[in-house]
Amino acid sequence: MAKPRIIIVGAGPSGTRAAEACVAAGIRPIVIDEGRRDGGQIYRRQPDNFTRPYEKLYGTEAGRAKALHETFDGLKGAIDYRPETLVWNIAAGQLWTASGTVQEAIPFDALLLCTGATDRLMPVKGWNLAGAYSLGGSQVALKSQAVSIGHKVLFMGSGPLLYLVASQYVEAGADVAAVLDTSPFSARLKALPDLLAMPSVLWNGVALTRTLKRAGVTVQHGVTPVEIMGDVESGVDGVRFRTASGREETIACDAVAMGYHLRPETQLADLARCAFAFDPGTRQWLPERDGDGRASVAGVYLAGDGAKILGARSAEASGRLAALAALVDLGLSVDKGEMASLRGDVANYAKFARGLAKAFPWPVEQAAKLPDDAILCRCEGVTAGDLRVVMRETGAKEANRAKAFSRVGMGRCQGRYCGLAAAELIAAEAGVPVEQVGRLRGQAPVKPLTIAIGEE
Amino acid sequence: MSRFVRLGETDRPSVALHVDGAPIEALEGDTLMVALLSAGDRLRQSEFGPEKRAGFCLMGACQDCWVWTESGDRLRACSTLAASGQRILTSQPGASWPNHV
């Protein structure tokens, strides 16, 4: 009998560990990744001709990053690795890929989606100006290109990444204007019992705030962003915000890195027809999976932050676990004891992630209060007011219907950066819970393709 | 004025390319985005508003960093490497947007 074909989408922490488990079982998986190099976003690798050591690039996670990269390098002869390749559709039991101008349809016996995450964004007036970047993007600039996104960078939003990237910028010698956190400091204390699930990670977080303090960086909690100020030609020149005590302040900067924790890339799970459920803790719709990573569709498995935001360490465990589950389902023998232990690891990471969600809440009230003249959809310049008018005129209260009438979520990012905030705005405007607004359906192609594409 | 600031890794061979007909110098291993924003402050004009754009996510998700070759090919500046001899345009050749005459 021919060996089963397993396809892994993504070569970050979960995809790498999944591939490792497949190879150990004697299978040569296809590993498809959009990146030029493996590592995903969190352990993104710098170009070959860069020389910064691991400690400088990944800080406290240097050992994990190095181990993961070495594992992947060691697997290269045993896997069918396809970098710089986009999976743009899943239909009729086949995966549709595009690389350059070449496209292919590949059938599979098992599909592991390790698609990772992008920043979760809350729009603010002026976030369409040149010089406003996603927080993750600001980290990519530093990590993979050794540049700062500006001469004076302000970090705004919430979540652990805010402090991590700001301190990485400080340590790399960048000029950091301030760190403005929308979550109140008190939320962190309430979250402490859950955060103690991973004391070492909690400690790393405390150390980051110390780095910022030592460098004299202004850190404010409980702020409300008002406006990214600037000029349509020259871009960002400052940020206006309200302090926790309600006073309005302005800080000058020529770049803003903004993010509110992360959101999973679930479009491929959606196209594979996986069932989704609303997760009240993160206020996100997530693909359903069992404790091992099995999706509702037979043969499809979900792992890492692409399924739910549990962090890079969890992604390594859930990637391996999902691969073992796939191997079991294909009739191969695996170590059941290891699976049980991986399940325990993932549960512990999940407890920690619950703590993070409590400590750094998604500021939904900002979406509700977004002024009419603020851009909601960056792709096509649709304002919050445009969406409100559409709702009033058409009665649209469902995400996809509102998208059809307003184009919010229809632009080139396909709602990745406006979709969650738009749902909150619709919910507030209609006076319904956000889960009732639903979720934007994934559409193929999940990213723009070139018209010149063809089969080889 | 440049938008991005180099914080290290500057000991790399340089590559020479053209942006809107003017020569710029970048470093081997730079993405087009880093090449253009280390030499200037913008990548393109928004088609839907008055503002200039300079990218957003840097990880191939937002598609805000599109630039073009002189022959009309669209490139995602954050994930395309700069190379000697490239001739890059910051507006789509042959396209005109009614908002911006």
Image (cartoon, coloured by chain):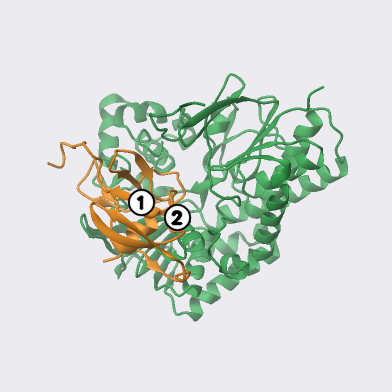
Chain colours: A green, B orange
- The answer to whether marks 2 and 1 mark residues whose Cβ atoms lie closer than 8 Å is yes
Residue identified by numbered label 2: A137
Q: Position of residue A417 (x, y in %)?
A: 41, 44
Rendered image: mark on residue B55: 1
* Residue shown at 62% from the left, 21% from the top: A93
Looking at the image, which is closer to me, B32 or A244?
B32
Q: Is residue B3 visible?
A: no
Q: Callout 1: residue from which chain?
A: B
**A213 shown above or below B56:** below
In the rendered image, the residue lying farthest to the left is B101
Q: Quadrant of residue A225?
A: bottom left
Q: Residue at x 56, y 71 (%)?
A: A208
* Circle 1 Cα neighbour tier, 10 Å, few/some/many (<14 / 14–19 / ≥20): many
User: In whole angstroms, how far apart are the C-alphas of marks 2 and 1?
Assistant: 9 Å
How many numbered discs sit on the rendered protein?
A: 2
Q: Secondary structure at mark 1?
A: loop
